[in-house]
Amino acid sequence: MEDMMRTRQERPTGSAPALPPSPPPAPRWAIRAAQLTTLIVLPTGLWRLAMVCGFPSGYTEAGFVHSTPRAPSCGC
């Protein structure tokens, strides 16, 4: 209780606790890999947005229909 009654000037001063050393920076490849992992979900996100907006994205009431772009036929 007596410590609480002391003014700032009367309190004993000690050295501030030392901060732990900061870790070394991450390797460049690890930073790059972490940044690129966000692109992994990009196709799924775009597909879900297309479905929400009404674009069938290959799905019909009958199920999945694989559609590949075809070259126009020349009738030969």
Image (cartoon, rainbow, N blue to C red):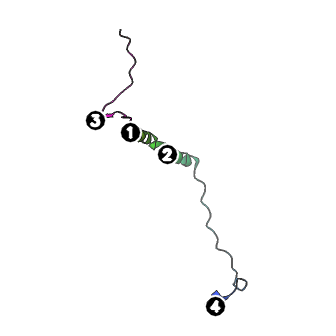
Nearer to us: label 3 or label 2 = 3
Nearer to us: label 3 or label 4 = 3
Amino acid type, mark 2: Thr
Residue occupying the point 52% across, 48% down: 34
Picture coordinates of residue 44 (x, y %)?
Answer: 42, 41
Picture coordinates of residue 1 (x, y %)?
Answer: 60, 90
Relative to 46, residue 16 above or below:
below
Q: CA distance from mark 1 to mark 4?
A: 70 Å
Which residues make up the magenta segment?
53-73
The numbered mark, 2 or 4, whose residue comes first in the sequence reads 4
| Left or right: residue 35 compared with residue 16 | left
Q: Assess whether residue 42 is covered by the magenta stretch.
A: no
Q: CA distance from mark 2 to mark 1?
A: 21 Å
Q: Which mark is residue 38?
A: 2
Say which element carries label 3.
loop
Q: Which mark is residue 51?
A: 1
Q: Which of the pair 11/29 is nearer the observer?
A: 11
The numbered mark, 3 or 2, whose residue comes first in the sequence reads 2
Relative to 70, residue 38 above or below:
below
Residue occupying the point 67% across, 74% down: 16
Which residue position is annotated with label 3? 61
Q: CA distance from mark 2 to mark 4?
A: 57 Å
Picture coordinates of residue 63 (x, y %)?
Answer: 28, 35
Say which element carries label 2.
helix
Q: Which mark is residue 2?
A: 4
Amino acid type, mark 4: Glu
Say which element carries label 1.
helix
The numbered mark, 1 or 4, whose residue comes first in the sequence reads 4
- Looking at the rendering, which quadrant does residue 60 occupy? top left
Is the Cβ of the residue at disc 1 closer than 8 Å to that at disc 3? no
Furthest residue to the bottom? 2
